[in-house]
Image: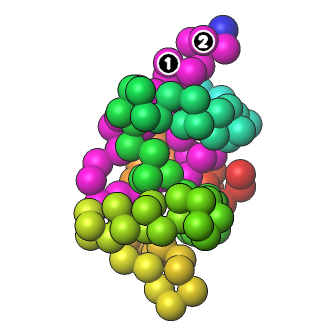
Amino acid sequence: MADDFCLSIKRVLHKIPRGRVATYGLIAAMAGNPRGARQVVRVLHSSAEKEKLPWHRVINAQGRISLPHGAGYELQKALLKREGVRFDRTDKVDFDKFLWASLANRSHRKTPRNE
């Protein structure tokens, strides 16, 4: 069952379009487990590079990059900016402009904020 969930997470990750972001909780919900945000982190950590997952398009529920400065933060921000994602002066992404969700999951709008 956990393997099925991991595969679902990877499928959802591959669907995030350029110039959009998703939260760990939103990805988990779209993959079938609204409480599986930590598993999304594990999948990204273990598989992002080898499976070419768009790890940089995943941010936290507050609209911010979770990686620490000096440990991936700058790279993630640069990759997002290259795709047109903009940050405010507090380094927050505007979910109204840049949050991605498939049309079928628009009703889960609360999910990203409830991680």
Give the amino acid at mark 1.
Leu
Query: From what the image shows, is residue 84 above or below residue 101?
Result: below
Give the amino acid at mark 2.
Asp
SS class, disc 1: helix
Q: Give the percent coordinates (x, y) of residue 96.
A: 43, 71
For the record, the magenta segment spans 2-31
Q: Residue furthest front?
A: 70
Q: Quadrant of the N terminus?
A: top right
Query: From what the image shows, is residue 54 above or below residue 48?
Result: below
Say which of 72 and 30 sits in front.
72
Left or right relative to 42: residue 72: left
For the point 42% across and 53% down, the residue is 57
Answer whether residue 49 is visible to the viewer in this image: yes
Left or right relative to 31: residue 13: left
**Magenta stretch, overall SS:** helix
Tell me where residue 28 sits by quadrant: top right
Tell me, yes or no, whether the two marked residues, 2 and 1, touch with CB atoms within 8 Å.
Answer: yes
For the point 46% across and 35% down, the residue is 48
Q: Answer whether residue 113 is magenta in the image.
A: no
Answer whether residue 40 is visible to the viewer in this image: no
> What's the CA distance linking mark 2 and mark 1?
6 Å
Q: Answer whether residue 9 is magenta in the image.
A: yes
Query: From what the image shows, is residue 18 above or below residue 6?
Result: below
Say which of 32 and 2 sits in front.
2
The residue under label 2 is: 3
Q: Give the percent coordinates (x, y) of residue 60.
A: 61, 59
For the point 59% across and 19% down, the residue is 5
The residue under label 1 is: 7
SS class, disc 2: helix
